[in-house]
Image (cartoon, coloured by chain):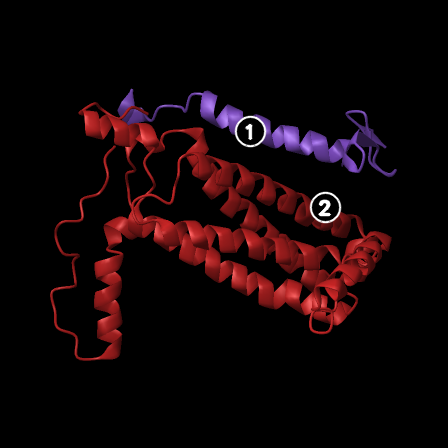
Amino acid sequence: MELWGVSLDQPATYWQIWEWVSVSIPNLLWILAMVGLFVGALLIPFPKGKDES
Amino acid sequence: MSAPTTDRPAAGTEFEPTTWTGSIRKRWLNTLPPEKMLPENQPSYVASWIYVFGMLTIVALLIVLVSGSILTVGGVQWFHTSSLGHFVNSLHYWSVQLFFMFMLVHLAGKFWMAAWRGGRALTWMTGVAAFLSSVGVAFTGYTITTNFNSQWIAFEAKDVMNAAGVGAVFNVADFGQMVLLHVMLLPVVLGVIVVAHVLLVRKHGVVPPLQAIDNEITGGVASS
């Protein structure tokens, strides 16, 4: 089964960054999603309430 | 929106207690009057997505607790063999992933706004304790999913625990000990810490952004 290019029923592929430093692609995607959430939370405008319009 | 005023004594505190229950009530109402405990308004700077992640973390935790309770009632065979069991098992797993994701975004937001300011050190430290105990709950959970993955994790971790010298009292290969830690002791510890964390946030109020403090000093108006 594949989801966004990531196989869910096989061992994950790893990105060997440097010697023993590596990260699995699913973990990397999850970390990038988390960073994206953080940046989005800072930049995306918060909706105004009814009493503030 | 404005912060609730706290100058006047809370309703119900103008009495001299003669019993220990009365003393607790008076102290509780002085520390957390109803308008602080359950506020209707928040300061304008709270109107930002970064302030949402604390509550998102709690919502994810509630889903973890509910789905975990269902798994406990259904049992191992049920969640491994039935489609509904698979669904609840997945719900439990993915709500844990979201719990940690939201908690880390919450942590990053609070770190970069130095949320320990203004007498909030204990609020920060209960957050640290909540994070560490969450790691413990998650770890014990990973060792009891009753599949090859949990077997692998438990027997890798066993060597780590033995190397650290705690393997005799914290035996990750002891399924019964891991189950009881995961479904009883550690969730209670985490729950108490989270409740204390939320009560401290209510007591001290949501931390203002650094910019709001600068504006206050220079006479400017804090913007959302």
Task: Please rate how many residues cluster around mark 1, counting C-alpha atoms within 10 Å: few if below 14, some from 14 to 19, many from 20.
Answer: some
Please say if B177 is above or below B11. below
> Is the C-beta separation of discs 1 and 2 under 8 Å?
no
Residue B180 placement (x, y as % from top left): 67, 69
Q: Where is residue B143 in the image (x, y as percent from the top left)?
A: 75, 58
Q: Name the residue under label 1.
A: A37
* Point 77% across, 49% down: residue: B86
Q: Which residue sits at x=16%, y=63%?
A: B12
Dot 2 amino acid type: Ser
Indicate the quadrant containing the C terminus of chain B: top left, top right, bottom left or bottom right: top left
- For residue A28, which quarter of the picture? top right
Which colour denotes chain B? red
Q: B215 left or right of A49?
A: left
| SS at mark 1 in the image | helix
Q: Which chain letter matches label 2?
A: B
| Mark sitting on residue B90 | 2
Chain painted in purple in the figure: A
Q: Quick one: quadrant of the N terminus of chain B? A: top left
**What chain does mark 1 sit on?**
A
Q: In this view, does B184 lie to the left or right of B89?
A: left
